[in-house]
Amino acid sequence: MSEVLGVVLAGGENRRYGSHKALEILGDKRIIDRVVDAVSAAVDEVALVANDSRLYETIGLEVRPDLIRGLGVLGGIFTAVSWAAEKSCGAALVVACDMPFLSSSLLLELATRAEPDAVTLPASRGPRGFEPLCAAYGVGCRKELELALDRGDRAVISALANVETRIMPLERVEIYGDPGLLFLNVNRPEDRKRAEALLIAGFPEGRTAGKG
């Protein structure tokens, strides 16, 4: 497997939170710092997609805006995959900037499973059954993403209809923790309060031995 580029997506408009959620403090770190630390422990190179690079100058990562602005999550994924292809990587390990409890070990397994002509996603208990914003997108799916954007389709599921998708089984994901917590999104202020309460209760530090 050729190199995997880690890409953190921070290009959202934060309407539900009301401010830049990735920069909110959780415990003793900003949320985005927690995400970057997890991704950096899994892959050698990490980059950031954000439309206002000034907000993230202190992180120390290369930052690029969406190739085409205003296209939501799918536009961010397309930018990440295009960036990975430019760097001659086989895949982009794409994660959202608002998942403070991501397991670096889970991310490492996703990166290890990555293939240039497939998308590798972890199963979840969410309505989709998998988590598209913690996944390895092979550079070979770039054309299908572009076609979806060209036809005005912003849904990740629709864009992947003609792409080989490989799902990491739920029982495998659960080795690293509760998927509902691993993939917890801080979309609203009440989500940050919940995450803070989880930290106080010992998650993720209190995971059982052997978990990431």
Image: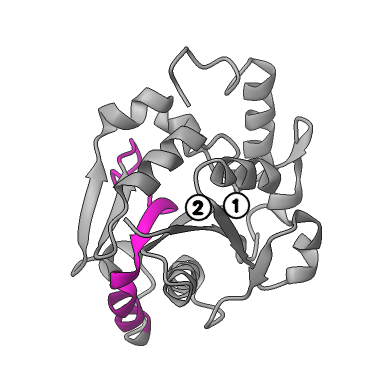
Horizontal side, residue 156 vs residue 209: left or right: left
Q: Residue at x 22, y 56 (%)?
A: 165
Residue 70: where, in percent of width, then height? 55, 78
Q: Residue at x 50, y 43 (%)?
A: 42
Q: Which residue is mark 2?
A: 95
Q: Residue at x 48, y 65 (%)?
A: 73
Disc 1 secondary structure class:
loop
Horizontal side, residue 175 vs residue 183: left or right: left
Would you say residue 138 sits in the magenta stretch? yes
Q: Nearer the viewer, residue 129 or 204?
A: 204
Amino acid type at circle 1 is: Cys
Can you tell which mark lies on residue 97? 1
The reply to whether dot 2 and dot 1 touch (C-beta < 8 Å) is yes
Disc 2 secondary structure class:
strand
Q: Nearer the viewer, residue 70 or 57?
A: 57
Amino acid type at circle 2 is: Val
Looking at this view, name the residue that lies furthest to the front: 2
Can you tell which mark lies on residue 24? none
Question: Which picture quadrant has residue 201?
Answer: top right
Magenta span? 123-149
Would you say residue 64 sits in the magenta stretch? no
Q: Nearer the viewer, residue 131 or 90?
A: 90
Q: Residue at x 28, y 76 (%)?
A: 144
